[in-house]
């Protein structure tokens, strides 16, 4: 097991030439590779620099890059304009679409005894390690997963082998991973590297991927209060320590501790990145440990047009809405449709305000009635975008029109906010 490149600190700022040099040195150490599969994230991780890393890999390896599969998980396939925007100049005939309901194989099962032990008995079922069949059957001599380590609601710290087992995973693996984490608890998961789900994925990698030529490139990206981004670290390797080094830096630069819990948080969802509550609810996940009891979260989502990216999940969100964790667990027990889609149930748990704070959701392309039907308060996107002019706001504390204070977050996907 090897770490090929490790460079990072809270003051590091890696540039394009640094990324290119790191990849070139890695490929030199690896030796000849003739059939390479790249696994970048999709457009929902636009600021991860994984798109640039993909372009650089193609530049350095040329035709030896035979396949590129964005790790969609349950997300919609990327459109041609999105591919060109995130991966400029890369031939689009290299891209493969991951279909999480169809093109998957099961590599093995993590035993129920292990799952029960690490979840303190909260979840007692085995977990299926599933991946897109191209990873197993594609004949590649390098499978290079590219992405960003950042606080995450389901696994604690995103990326590493989550990009493989969830990003290219199947229905059972994705569903069960999300639901067991939701039942275990979002507050016990967010921002932590060594979570139960991470241990499950590490077990799967150690036991079922020995013949799979996996390599990981992990970025750590910090957003500054004025919205500028700095790549604070890049770690390239094939072992768990590669991830844990990146996660330690992400803890330092991606978690913001507030001196007191804000009574009002305003979070903006970039139209290029967020078109559904399935994705946009990162505004809720990443701020819920900061917002004061009885407080309010205002979500500005000018391009939000749907709830779930998957039609079946969209229907379930519309049917059940964002209810409390205990209510959703009861509904799963009582309703076959929700029981058959545990990742949808997990999403409803994670997106709940738990009757502790109000969520005002200003969705540009969903009606007020639709927003109210899922247990959020509708917001007028035009009025609120005028009131909170994002071109004039830096991340941090501000004074509202009525004299009260609010805390503004330009991109909730890039961090985690917690009250001390």
Image (tube, grey):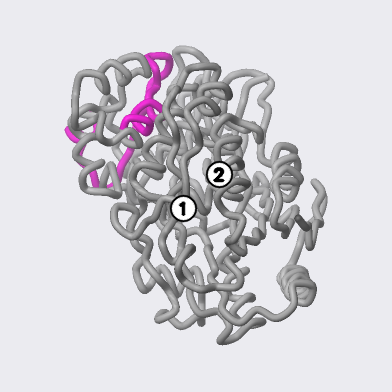
Residue at 65%, 58% in the rendered image:
216
Per the rendered image, the range of residues in magenta is: 345-372
- Residue 27 locus on image (x, y percent): 73, 74
Asked whether residue 393 is in view, the answer is no
User: Is the residue 35 above or below the residue 419 in the image?
Assistant: below
Q: Foreground: 285 or 34?
A: 34
- Residue visible at 49% across and 68% down? 86
Q: Residues within 10 Å of mark 2 (few under 14, many from 20)?
A: many
Element marked by disc 2: helix
In this rendering, the count of numbered labels is 2
Report the side of 64 relative to 380 (left or right): right
Percent x, y of residue 199: 60, 35
Comparing 360 with 404, the one in front is: 360
Q: Quadrant of residue 384?
A: top left
Rendered view: 39 above or below 90: above
First-in-chain label (2 vs 1) = 1
Q: Residue at x 27, y 23 (%)?
A: 332
Tell me: residue 183, above or below residue 340.
above
Give 324 or 113, whichever is nearer the viewer: 113
Q: Which residue is mark 1?
A: 167
Q: Which mark is residue 232?
A: none
Locate the N terminus by quadrant.
bottom right
- Quadrant housing residue 7: bottom right
The image quadrant where one finds the C terminus is top right
- The residue depicted at 72 percent of the width and 71 percent of the height is 23
Q: What mark, if any, has residue 204 been given in the picture?
A: 2
Left/right of residue 156 with respect to residue 224 in the rendered view: left
Question: Was residue 358 drawn as part of the magenta stretch in this picture?
Answer: yes
How far is mark 2 from mark 1, CA to CA? 15 Å
Secondary structure under tag 1 reads loop
- Percent across and percent down for residue 369 are 17, 33
């Amino acid at each position: 097991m090897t770490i090929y490149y490790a460079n990072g600190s809270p003051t590091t700022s890696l540039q394009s030439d640094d990324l290119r040099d790191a990849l070139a040195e890695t490929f030199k150490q690896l030796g000849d590779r003739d059939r390479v599969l790249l696994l970048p994230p999709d457009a929902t991780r636009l600021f991860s620099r994984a798109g640039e890393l993909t372009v650089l890999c193609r530049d350095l390896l040329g035709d030896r890059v035979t396949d590129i599969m964005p790790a969609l998980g349950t997300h919609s396939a990327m459109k041609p304009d999105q591919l060109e925007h995130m991966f400029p100049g890369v031939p689009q005939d290299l891209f493969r679409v991951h279909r999480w309901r169809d093109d998957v194989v099961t590599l093995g099962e993590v035993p129920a005894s292990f799952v029960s032990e690490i979840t303190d008995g909260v979840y007692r079922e085995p977990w299926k390690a599933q991946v897109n069949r191209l990873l197993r059957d594609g004949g590649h001599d390098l499978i290079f997963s590219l992405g960003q380590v950042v606080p995450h609601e389901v696994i604690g710290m995103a990326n590493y082998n989550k990009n493989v087992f969830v990003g290219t995973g199947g229905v059972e693996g994705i569903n069960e991973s999300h639901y067991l984490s939701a039942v275990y608890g979002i507050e016990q998961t967010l921002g932590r590297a060594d979570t139960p789900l991470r241990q499950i994925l590490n077990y799967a990698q150690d036991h079922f991927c020995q013949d799979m030529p996996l390599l990981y490139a992990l970025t750590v990206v910090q957003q500054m209060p004025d919205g500028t981004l700095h790549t604070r670290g890049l770690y390239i390797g094939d072992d768990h320590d590669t991830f844990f080094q990146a996660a330690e830096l992400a803890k330092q630069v991606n978690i913001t501790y507030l001196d007191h819990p804000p009574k009002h948080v305003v979070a903006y969802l970039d139209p290029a990145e967020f078109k559904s509550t399935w994705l946009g609810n990162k505004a809720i996940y990443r701020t819920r440990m900061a917002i004061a009891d009885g407080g309010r979260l205002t979500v500005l989502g000018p391009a939000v047009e749907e709830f779930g990216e998957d039609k079946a999940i969209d229907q379930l969100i519309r049917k059940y809405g964002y209810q409390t964790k205990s209510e959703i667990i009861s509904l799963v027990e009582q309703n076959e449709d929700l029981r058959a889609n545990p990742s949808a149930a997990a999403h409803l748990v994670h997106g709940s305000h738990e009757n502790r704070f109000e969520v005002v959701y200003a969705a540009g392309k969903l009606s007020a009635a639709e927003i109210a039907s899922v247990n959020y308060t509708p917001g007028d996107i035009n009025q609120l975008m005028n009131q909170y002019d994002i071109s004039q706001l830096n991340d941090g504390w501000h004074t509202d029109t009525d004299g009260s204070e609010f805390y503004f977050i330009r991109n909730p996907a890039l961090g985690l906010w917690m009250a001390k």
